[in-house]
């Protein structure tokens, strides 16, 4: 779900059915009701994360019918949803769902966690002009991992961690 313009929007997920959905719905507060928008994602999707970057809505990873996906989709919302069309603009290093995404600055974002164990962080650059996602590579990954580990030690009392937890 995300808030934009005059409503709260949801896309994909399980909207009252037992199958993944492609559709978009919008809650219009003035009317106090949900409305189907008549548009769809490229694939039925759940457990994805997204970013709204100016006039582009990026859906990052998630779970499709065939399983977890590494795909990143971009949808142009610059003209509202009337000219809504999406396309694949990049890939994560690995398929993941239930992850979080954080915008670092205007064009860079961080993907964190999800249902993976050996690749906790990924950073990307979104080239709006070319409408592609570029992986920032290992250098950026290593830097964020060092910062994260330093802060975990700083903010958590390591002696109080459960015996089965791994100390970074």
Image (spheres, grey):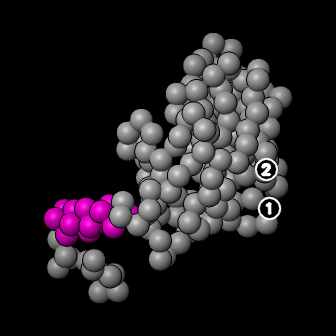
Query: Is 157 drawn above or below residue 36 in the view shown?
Result: below
Question: In which quadrant is the N terminus drawn?
Answer: top right
Query: Which residue is depicted at the point 60% across and 17% down?
Result: 6
Query: Which residue is depicted at the point 52% across and 33% down?
Result: 53
- The secondary structure that dominates the magenta segment is helix
Question: Where's residue 59, x and y in %?
Answer: 62, 46
Question: Where's residue 122, x and y in %?
Answer: 46, 60
* Horizontal arrangement in the rendering, residue 88 relative to residue 1 (left or right): right
State yes or no: residue 152 in magenta. yes
Question: In which quadrant is the C terminus drawn?
Answer: bottom left
Can you see residue 152?
no
Which residue does the numbered mark 1 point to in the structure image? 65
User: SS at mark 1?
Assistant: loop
Q: Are marks 1 and 2 in contact (CB under 8 Å)?
A: yes
State yes or no: residue 109 in magenta. no
> Is tag 1's residue or tag 2's residue first in the polypeptide sequence?
2
Question: Where's residue 103, x and y in %?
Answer: 42, 43
Query: Is 84 drawn above or below residue 66 in the view shown?
Result: above
């Amino acid at each position: 779900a995300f808030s934009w313009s005059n409503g709260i929007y949801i896309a994909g997920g399980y909207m009252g059915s037992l199958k993944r959905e492609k559709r978009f719905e919008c809650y219009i507060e003035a009317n106090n009701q949900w409305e189907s928008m008549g548009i769809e994602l490229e694939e039925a999707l759940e457990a994805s994360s997204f970013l709204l970057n100016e006039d582009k809505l990026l859906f990052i990873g998630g779970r499709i019918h065939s399983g977890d996906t590494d795909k990143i989709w971009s949808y142009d919302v610059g003209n509202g949803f009337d000219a809504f069309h999406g396309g694949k603009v990049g890939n994560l290093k690995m398929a993941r769902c239930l992850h979080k995404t954080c915008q670092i600055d205007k064009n860079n974002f961080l993907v964190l966690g999800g249902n993976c164990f050996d690749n906790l962080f990924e950073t990307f650059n979104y080239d709006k002009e070319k409408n592609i996602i570029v992986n920032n590579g290992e250098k950026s990954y290593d830097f964020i991992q060092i910062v994260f580990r330093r802060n975990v030690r700083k903010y958590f009392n390591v002696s109080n961690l459960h015996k089965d937890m791994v100390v970074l």
